[in-house]
Image: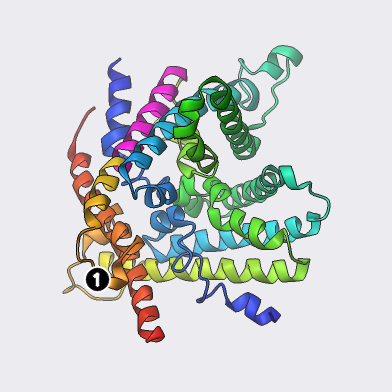
Amino acid sequence: MSLFNEFSKGLYEKNPVFRLALGLCPTLAVSNSIENAIGMGLAATFVLVCSNVIVSMMRKAVPNKIRIPIYIVVIATFVTIVDLVLEATRYELHKSLGLFIPLIVVNCIILGRAEAFAGKNGVVRSFVDGLGMGIGFTLALLVLGFVRELLGDGKLIGISILGEAFKPVLLLILPPGAFLTLGIFLGLFNWIDIKRSK
Amino acid sequence: MEKLLIIAIGAIFISNFVFSRFLGICPYIGVSKSLDSAIGMGMAVIFVMTLASTVTWLINTYFLQPTESNLFYILFAEKIDLSYLRTIAFILVIASLVQFVEMVIQKVSPTLYSSLGIYLPLITTNCAILGVAILNFDNIDRPYNFIESIVHGFTAGIGFTLALVLMAGIREKLEMAPVPRPLQGIPIAFIMAGLMAIAFLGFSGLSID
C-alpha cells in the first residue's frame, strides 16, 4: 500500500468513528460544539501520532507478553503532556473537555492502532497511519459537532447562523441528541454502502 | 448517610454513566446483544468499579497528593507533589487490578470465572472504570472522601448495569422487529439509546439537595 493510501484510509474507508465504531465515548461527549470537537480531535491526533511513532520504534525491543501495558504507559505519558499543556494554554477548552482529556488513555482508537498497526510497521508508515486516523477522528467529531451545534443552538463557533426565526432543537445539544445523531449518521453510511454495492 | 444516598441516586439515575456522562459506551453497545452476557458484564463492572475506586483513592491520597497524610511526607517530612502522575498511575493500577482479580477468581471459583472471566479483560479499556476513579476527585463540588468514593464506585456500576440490562432486554425483542437494513445492528442500538436517554433526562428534574 502506498503512503498516501495509508493516510487516506483513515479519512473515509476505515474512518475510526463511522466505519470501525471505535472511540465512541469521547465522540458522543464532546461533539456538542465545533470548538470542543476540534480541541478533542487535535488532542487525540497528537497522542495517536506520537504513540504510534514511539511504539513503532520500540516494536523490536518490546517482549510480546507485556506489550499492552507498555503501550498503555506510552499513551498515558503523551496524554499527560496534552493535559498539562492544554491546562496551561487553553484553560477554557480544558475545562469544557474536562474528564475526557485523561480518558484519551482508554480511547480504543489509540490502543487499537498501536496494537494493529504500529507494533508491526515501520516508523514512517506508523506516523502516516496515526495522522490519517487522527484526522479521520477529528473529521467525524466535526461533522457531528456541526450538525448538533447548528440545529441545537442555531450557531456555529458561537456566531448565529440560522437567525432569530429558527427555533433551536435543544434536544440535540443534550445527551440524547448525541446518541440520535450518531445513530442516524451510522445508518447513513451503511445506506451509502448498500447503494454502492448494488 | 444522607450524603451517601444523594451520591447513590445521582450516580444511578441523574448522571447515569451511560446516558448522561457517555462513559463505557463500547461495552454498552458491544455486550448488550443478550441478557445473560449483559448481566455477567454488569456484575464484573460493579465489582471492578468498587475495587478500583477503593484502590485509586488510597493511591491518590497516600502517594500522589501533597498533603499531611502523604506517605512521602511522613517518611521524609517533605511535600512532594506527584499529582501530575495521576493518569498514568490510575490506568496502571486499574490494568493490574483487573489482571489480579482475574487470576484470583480463576483460582478461587472456577464457576464464577467461567461466567465473568471473558468480560474481565474487556474492562481494562472500559473508560467507565478510569472515569469513576477520576470523578471521585474531579467532580463538581469537592473530592469525595474514602467511604463516599466506594459508594460512588459501587452505585455508578449499578447505574451502568441498569442501562446495560435495559438495553439488552430491548435488543432481544428488536431481533424480531422489521428494522430497515441500513439501520440494523449498531445504528438502531444508538437510536434506542437516544430514546432511553430522553427518558433518563427526566431524572435530571429531581432535586435532591
* Residue A190 seen in this snapshot: yes
| Residue B107 falls left or right of residue B12 | right
| Magenta span of residues | B146-164
Dot 1 surroundings within 10 Å: few (below 14), some, or many (20 or more)?
A: few
Q: Quadrant of residue A149?
A: bottom left
Measuring from the top left, give residue A46's x and y in whole percent.
63, 61
Of residue B22 and residue A43, the one placed in the foreground of this image is B22
Q: Is residue A108 magenta?
A: no
Measuring from the top left, give residue B94's x and y in whole percent.
57, 34
Asked if A132 appears above or below A80 in the picture, the reply is below
- The chain that hosts pointer 1 is B
| Residue B137 falls left or right of residue B99 | left
Q: Residue at x 62, y 16 (%)?
A: B68
Q: Amino acid at mark 1?
A: Pro
> Residue under circle 1?
B180
Asked if A132 appears above or below B21 in the picture, the reply is below
Q: Quadrant of residue A188?
A: bottom left
Q: Quadrant of the N terminus of chain B?
A: top left
Q: How many marks?
A: 1
Q: Residue at x 38, y 63 (%)?
A: A33
* Residue A159 seen in this snapshot: no
Of residue B134 and residue A17, the one placed in the foreground of this image is A17
| Residue B56 falls left or right of residue B82 | left
Q: Residue at x 58, y 23 (%)?
A: B107
Magenta span main SS: helix
Q: Residue at x 45, y 41 (%)?
A: B128
Measuring from the top left, give residue B57's x and y in whole percent.
53, 24
Asked if A115 appears above or below A34 in the picture, the reply is above
Q: Quadrant of the C terminus of chain B?
A: top left
The local secondary structure at tag 1 comes to: loop
Measuring from the top left, give residue B50's x and y in whole percent.
45, 26
